């Protein structure tokens, strides 16, 4: 399939997501998650993809990315998941597509929704009842955001400009958990 380069613009933010065929698994074991995280780390810089928030779930994934080069984010996602699917198909002895068609994306055109979308992405495992707290899910960059894990799968400048301390983001995430409310105004930017 051709790249969708014309829909992605430098210095803009995008929520990118996809799920498994028939809502089936895309990660079969912890090694699959780790391999995917390693591939993200390997490919995001060469393709000008700045990772803001990410979460890998058993049957889907979420990214909030900023395109910082003239290369399309589409190239990054395609290279990343072509490599991932080939490895998983070999490991699982399976053939064919792993994902339900091409990835989906939404351009985030309102800055005030960016941090709310980060929280939504980081809370995905909690909302799915996989873990009680966001920091318990090892396959997102939440723990990098709050300083519990070292890594390059985040944009420190973005985080500091919105949350001067990790505790402030932790509280921001905890506040929505306590309120147990729906996404409200960001509902146009998320995938239900």
Image (cartoon, grey):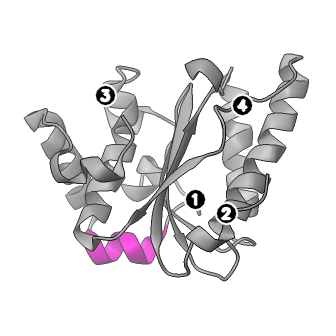
Q: Residue furthest left?
A: 179
Q: Look at the image and tell me whether residue 177 can be seen.
A: yes
Closer to us: mark 4 or mark 2? 2
Per the image, the residue denoted by label 3 is 127
Q: Which residues are magenta?
A: 155-164
The answer to which of marks 3 and 1 sits earlier in the sequence is: 3
Above or below for 158 versus 176 = below
Inter-mark Cα distance, 4 to 3: 22 Å
Q: Assign a secondary structure to mark 1.
A: loop
Q: Earlier in the sequence, mark 4 or mark 3?
A: 4
Residue located 18% across and 36% down the image: 177
Labels 4 & 2 near each other (Cβ < 8 A): no
- Determine the image quadrant of residue 92: top right
Provide the residue designation for mark 2: 4
- Residue at mark 1: 151
Residue 53 sits in quarter: bottom left
Along the polypeptide, which appears first: circle 1 or circle 4? 4
Q: CA distance from mark 4 to mark 2?
A: 27 Å
Q: Position of residue 169 (x, y in %)?
A: 26, 57
Identify the secondary structure beneath mark 2: loop
Q: What residue appears at the point 16 percent right and 42 percent down from the top-left corner?
A: 176
Upstream in the sequence, badge 2 or badge 1?
2
Q: Is residue 12 left or right of residue 21?
A: left
Q: What residue sits right under mark 4 in the picture? A: 32
Foreground tag (2 vs 1): 2
């Amino acid at each position: 399939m051709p790249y969708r380069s014309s829909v992605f613009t430098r210095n803009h933010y995008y929520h990118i997501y996809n799920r498994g065929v028939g809502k089936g698994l895309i990660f079969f074991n912890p090694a699959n998650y780790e391999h995917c995280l390693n591939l993200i780390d390997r490919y995001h810089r060469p393709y000008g993809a700045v990772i803001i928030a990410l979460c890998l779930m058993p049957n889907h994934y979420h990214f909030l990315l900023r395109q910082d080069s003239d290369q399309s984010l589409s190239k990054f996602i395609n290279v990343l998941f072509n490599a991932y699917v080939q490895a998983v198909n070999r490991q699982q002895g399976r053939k064919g597509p792993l994902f339900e068609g091409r990835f989906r994306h939404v351009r985030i055109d309102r800055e005030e929704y960016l941090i709310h979308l980060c929280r939504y992405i980081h809370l995905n495992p909690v909302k799915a009842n996989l873990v009680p707290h966001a920091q318990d899910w090892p396959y997102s960059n939440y723990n990098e955001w709050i300083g519990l894990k070292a890594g390059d799968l985040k944009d420190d400048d973005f985080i500091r400009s919105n949350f001067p301390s990790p505790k402030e983001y932790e509280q921001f995430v905890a506040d929505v958990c306590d309120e147990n409310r729906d996404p409200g105004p960001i509902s146009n930017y998320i995938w239900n």
